Amino acid sequence: MEEVIHARGHEHVSAEHASTFEVTTDDYLTPAGDCILAIEADRAPTDFDPEFVEACRDSDATITFEIEAGGHRDSVTGRGDPDLEFANERSAVGRTSEYVDDRTILLEASGAASAFDRDLVDALADGAAARVTLRVESDLVDQ
C-alpha cells in the first residue's frame, strides 16, 4: 500500500539534520530548515487514504520513505505506531526517534536528512522535481 507526493527541491535544501527529515507544502525554505528535503508538496499527511493511515498505526508496520529527484533515488525505513495521527495539513516528518506529533509519518527511521545520498541532495538543492513514495507493510490491512 502506498501514497505518492510530488514536490520540488529548493536552493536552501541542505539535508544536514541528524534526527529528522521533512517534506512540506510550504512554498519557501530558509537555511534554518536543514531537515527539509522538498517543498511545494501536493499532499500532506491529512490527505492520505484512511486505510493507509490505519496500516501505519500498526507498531509492527514497516514504512519506507523513498525520494527520487534529478535521476537519483534514496530511501529510509522506519516503523509505524498506534499514536500516529496523520493530521498535519503542511508537513510530513520522518524521525529517527520515537517522538510523535501530528506531522510524524514514521518512527525509528534508518536515517535522517543527513543520511540521504549527496547527489540526490544536490539535485534537490538545484530545484529538481521530486517524487516521494511512502510504502507501508502491515498485517493490519490486506496488502
Image (tube, grey):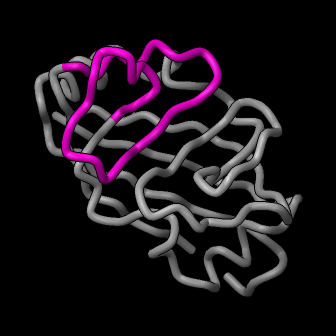
| 7 and 115: which is toward the camera | 7
Residue 136 percent across, percent down from the top left: 64, 64
Left or right: residue 140 versus residue 113 is: right
Q: Nearer the viewer, residue 13 or 52?
A: 13
Report the residue at 18% width, 29% height from top. 10
Where's residue 24, x and y in %?
A: 36, 47
Quarter of the image where the C terminus is located: bottom right
Who's the residue at 55% across and 44% down the image?
93
- Which residue is depicted at the point 71% across and 44% down? 78
Q: How many marks?
A: 0
In reply to whether residue 26 is colored magenta, the answer given is: yes
The quarter of the rendered structure image containing the N terminus is bottom right
39 to the left or right of 59: left
Q: Say left or right for 80 vs 52.
A: right
49, above or below 26, in the image: below
Write the start and end of the magenta stretch as one range: 12-37
**Residue pictured at 49% horizontal, 24% vertical:** 113
Q: Position of residue 49 (x, y in %)?
A: 53, 82
**Whether residue 34 is situated above or below residue 49 in the rendered picture:** above
Residue 57 picture location, percent across and down = 78, 68
Residue 36 sits in quarter:
top left
Residue 64 appears left or right of 7: right
Q: Is residue 128 magenta?
A: no
Q: Is residue 120 above or below residue 7?
A: above
